[in-house]
Image (tube, rainbow, N blue to C red):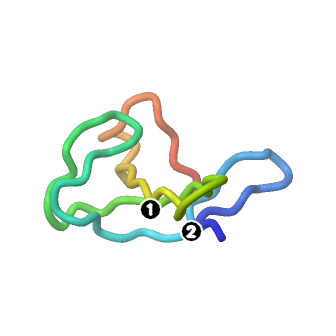
């Protein structure tokens, strides 16, 4: 099961919640290191084999140029 859902009207991924990333994580949108206590959006992608892959992106779109976060 995925932590993101799809908006059927736009077929865009919708982030489920705002959280804090574990130490050492990088933004999957821009590749920058995520600072401690920096709010991020958590996403999850299912794989055909193995557990789902969890990823994080900056919650502030100014931090992640070219990436739009839909809340």
| Residue drawn at the location 39% of the way across and 42% of the way down | 28
| Residue drawn at the location 61% of the way across and 62% of the way down | 4
**Of residues 63 and 22, the one drawn nearer to the viewer in this rendering:** 22
Residue pointed to by mark 2: 16
Question: In the figure, is residue 57 to the left or right of 25?
Answer: right
* Image vertical order of residue 62 relative to residue 34, above or below: above
Q: Earlier in the sequence, mark 2 or mark 1?
A: 2
* Image vertical order of residue 7 relative to residue 64, above or below: below
Question: In the figure, is residue 31 to the left or right of 57?
Answer: left
| Residue drawn at the location 51% of the way across and 41% of the way down | 68
The percent coordinates of residue 27 (x first, y second) are: 32, 45
Question: In the figure, is residue 4 to the left or right of 43?
Answer: right
Q: Secondary structure at mark 1?
A: strand
| Number of other residues with Cα within 10 Å of mark 1, as a class: few under 14, some 14 to 19, many 20 or more | many
Residue pointed to by mark 1: 42
Question: In the figure, is residue 3 to the left or right of 11?
Answer: left
Q: Secondary structure at mark 2?
A: loop
**Of residues 9 and 20, the one drawn nearer to the viewer in this rendering:** 20
Considering every residue shown, the one lying at the far front of the view is 49
| Number of other residues with Cα within 10 Å of mark 2, as a class: few under 14, some 14 to 19, many 20 or more | some
* Image vertical order of residue 67 relative to residue 49, above or below: above
Considering every residue shown, the one lying at the far top of the view is 66
């Amino acid at each position: 099961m995925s932590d993101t859902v799809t908006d059927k009207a736009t077929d865009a991924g919708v982030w489920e919640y705002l959280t804090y990333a574990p130490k050492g994580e990088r933004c999957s949108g821009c590749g920058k290191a995520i600072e401690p206590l920096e709010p991020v959006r958590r996403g999850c992608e299912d794989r055909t084999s193995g557990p789902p892959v969890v990823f994080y992106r900056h919650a502030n779109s100014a931090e992640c140029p070219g990436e739009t976060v839909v809340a």
